[in-house]
Image (tube, rainbow, N blue to C red):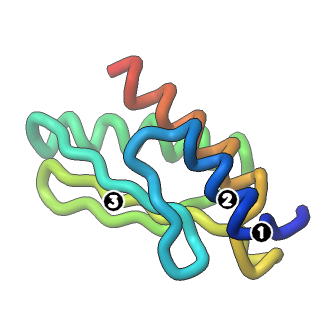
Amino acid sequence: MKKLSEAEISKELEQLDGWEYVDGAIETTFEFKNFKEAFSVMTRIAFECEAQEHHPDWQNVYNTLSIRLNTHDADGVTQKDFQLAKRIEDIIESE
């Protein structure tokens, strides 16, 4: 998959709420009511990641989930990252 330019990344980010481009990846943070809710969402996201064969760098501390996406094979951000980010948004919104 082709690495996107910074202009292409900026345009794609307009379609996502709260995501930003930082050091070669797109990233965001979500806050939940408690750890159980955060972990539940992480589990749903994990199944989607497996389905797409694309895995985030992520971190969970209590009720906070930080997600960072890039495509290692392309050494940058690709459409694959935005496809997963949009799906993650769908999962979050359905909670």
Label for residue 5?
Answer: 1
**In what quadrant of the picture does the N terminus appear?**
bottom right
Residue beneath label 3, please?
Answer: 66
Which residue is depicted at the point 35% across and 37% down? 41
Residue 54 picture location, percent across and down = 68, 56
Residue 39 picture location, percent across and down = 27, 44
Which residue is depicted at the point 64% across and 68% down? 70
From the viewer's perspective, is the residue at label 1 or at label 3 nearer? 1
Which residue is depicted at the point 69% across and 69% down? 6
Mark 2 → mark 3, Cα distance in angstroms: 19 Å
Q: Amino acid at mark 3?
A: Ser
Which residue is depicted at the point 57% across and 63% down? 69
SS for callout 1 = loop
State if disc 1 and disc 2 touch (CB < 8 Å): yes
When asked about the image quadrant of residue 60, the answer is bottom left
Mark 1 → mark 3, Cα distance in angstroms: 24 Å
Residue 43 picture location, percent across and down = 41, 41
Which of marks 3 and 1 precedes in the sequence? 1
Give the vertical position of 52 relative to 54 (above or below): above
Give the vertical position of 13 relative to 23 (above or below): above
Label for residue 9?
Answer: 2
Residue 75 picture location, percent across and down = 75, 81
SS for callout 3 = strand
Q: Amino acid at mark 1?
A: Ser
The one nearer the camera, 80 or 18, is 18
